[in-house]
Image: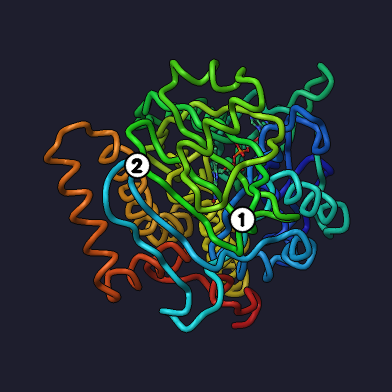
């Protein structure tokens, strides 16, 4: 590829968060000239993507990250998930998923988003053909026949660039999606997730717990140094009070809600909150533009699927582009024919994952006794029937539909 001037690129990735930075790692070996545009400096405390959240990464995501060269930098700070316990608050029934039922010893790993950020952004400067434009925000996008024209704002100065393919990885409020007038499906769950690290008295032994409540899940994930990642979803009106509770009251409240599976909670870290909304783009491609990650689908964190879904977007887009380049068609990477292959491949996984998370979030918020009875019957069915549990476990591990090469542990460049 022979780009003409410094501001012409094959691919401009807008958003250098979890998904955008992963995509830069995936595309770098393809020989494309890439710009990665990120508004907030990578190490800033205000960086919205690389914060205190503990991310449960499915087995397929860990495979993808290995293929991208990111996993070796994370492995030392990743905690294997050895069991998943699911129950409903104050109702009978508990499902325990064990990877042994699938002949494995873990479902995936838990990693802190900040640790992920440090790993991936440490890798970016070494990638060939990649210009990191940070801090810089996209302020205008004009699609064109062969290339889109973009204006960035960098320290108040406008900076124009052109790209054959623009990838929107700029999160749920995506500027790219909005500037193209792409409509979204939205739902406000009226729930807010309060998250922090929490230290239990007893060892977590790799167990992840998800307890459904009418105001969303209460989840405890295994983490490094005996700590756990806590996600406590409450009705949004109650979030401020939970954030402000003195530590001892917070720890006692958490223990009361969680039960005695890990003994008392003895210490907690800084709390932060996330209002929970579904935002789903009604289109994920336009000529010369792809929308992925949270820009395409910001979903409820129940089941810990959001970044996993975005990583599968990354793996599929990288594979579709690689196959096109391998066939000698690199000039066409922004064509609708190519992008439709991406979109059609991703549709079943995105639809299935969104339907599952949205369905769970709404079903457990439904106060009717009939809905409660159906939920309990469902939990008992999963508890008693190994084939149902295995199906659930395979989905939780991120293996859905036509699996991209990277998720199978194969090299992207191996055809
Ligand atoms: C409480 C909670 C817990 C979660 N737990 C899990 C989990 O366990 N497992 C899991 O898989 N997922 C989880 N998720 C979901 C996960 O956090 C998201 O799916 C993920 O952050 C999406 O990454 P992204 O890069 O698409 O978007 P973002 O993380 O929103 O990143 C977008 C990036 O784009 C940048 N940007 C925005 N606008 C511009 C602009 N105009 N110009 C340039 N740059 C711009 C931003 O600064 C940011 O860096 C959780 C979410 C929440 C809220």
Residue at image location 57% in from the left, 49% down from the top: 263
Q: Relative to the observer, which residue lies in front, 224 or 350?
A: 224
Q: Earlier in the sequence, mark 2 or mark 1?
A: 2
Residue at image location 61% in from the left, 64% down from the top: 205
394 relative position to 247: left or right: left
Q: CA distance from mark 2 to mark 1?
A: 20 Å
Report how many numbered discs are placed on residues in the image.
Answer: 2
SS of the residue under disc 2: loop
Residue at image location 59% in from the left, 22% down from the top: 243
Ligand 1 placement by image quarter: top right
206 relative position to 113: left or right: left
**Is residue 321 at least partly visible in the picture?**
no
Residue holding disc 1: 222
**Coordinates of residue 9 in the picture (x, y in percent):** 73, 47
Give residue 76's mark. none
**Coordinates of residue 238 in the picture (x, y in percent):** 46, 18
Q: Are marks 2 and 1 in contact (CB under 8 Å)?
A: no
SS of the residue under disc 1: strand
Q: Relative to the observer, which residue lies in front, 319 or 367?
A: 367
**Is residue 382 at least partly visible in the picture?**
yes
Q: Quadrant of residue 225?
A: bottom right
Mark nearest the camera among 2 and 1 is 2
Give residue 89's mark. 2
Quadrant location, the C terminus: bottom right
Other-residue count near label 2 (Cα within 10 Å), few / some / many at <14 / 14–19 / ≥20: some
Q: Is residue 35 placed above or below 109 in the rendered structure?
A: above
Which residue is farthest right? 126
């Amino acid at each position: 590829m022979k780009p003409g001037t410094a501001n012409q690129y094959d691919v401009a990735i807008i958003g250098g968060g979890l998904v955008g930075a992963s995509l830069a790692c995936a595309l770098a070996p393809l020989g494309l000239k890439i710009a990665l545009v990120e508004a907030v400096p990578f190490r800033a405390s205000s960086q919205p993507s690389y914060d205190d959240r503990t991310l449960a990464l499915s087995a397929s995501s860990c495979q993808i990250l290995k293929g991208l060269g990111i996993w070796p930098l994370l492995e030392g700070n990743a905690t294997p998930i050895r069991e998943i316990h699911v129950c409903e608050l104050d109702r009978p029934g508990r499902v325990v998923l064990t990877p042994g039922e699938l002949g494995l010893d873990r479902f995936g790993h838990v990693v802190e988003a900040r640790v992920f950020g440090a790993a991936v952004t440490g890798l970016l400067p070494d990638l060939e053909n990649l210009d990191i434009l940070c801090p810089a925000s996209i302020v205008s996008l004009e699609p064109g026949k062969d290339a889109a024209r973009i204006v960035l704002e960098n320290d108040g100065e406008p900076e124009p660039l052109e790209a054959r393919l623009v990838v929107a990885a700029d999160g749920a409020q995506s500027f790219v999606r909005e500037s193209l007038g792409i409509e979204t499906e939205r739902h406000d769950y009226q729930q807010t997730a309060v998250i922090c690290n929490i230290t239990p008295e007893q060892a977590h032994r790799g167990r992840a717990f998800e307890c459904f409540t009418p105001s969303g899940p209460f989840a405890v994930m295994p983490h490094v140094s005996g700590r756990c990642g806590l996600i406590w979803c409450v009705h949004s009106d109650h979030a401020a009070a939970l954030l402000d509770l003195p530590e001892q009251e917070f720890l006692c409240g958490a223990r009361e809600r969680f039960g005695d599976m890990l003994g008392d909670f003895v210490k907690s870290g800084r709390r932060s909150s996330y209002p929970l909304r579904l935002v789903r783009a009604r289109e994920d491609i336009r000529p010369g533009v792809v929308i992925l990650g949270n820009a395409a689908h910001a979903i409820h964190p129940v089941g810990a699927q959001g970044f996993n879904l975005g990583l599968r977007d990354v793996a599929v887009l990288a594979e579709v582009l690689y196959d096109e380049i391998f066939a000698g068609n690199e000039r066409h990477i922004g064509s609708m024919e190519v992008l439709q292959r991406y979109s059609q491949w991703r549709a079943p996984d995105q639809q299935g994952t969104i339907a599952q998370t949205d369905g769970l979030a709404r079903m457990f918020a439904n106060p009717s006794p009939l809905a409660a009875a159906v939920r309990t019957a469902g939990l008992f069915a999963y508890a008693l029937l190994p084939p149902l549990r295995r199906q659930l476990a395979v989905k939780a591990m991120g293996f859905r539909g036509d699996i991209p090469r990277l998720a199978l542990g194969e090299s992207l460049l191996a055809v």
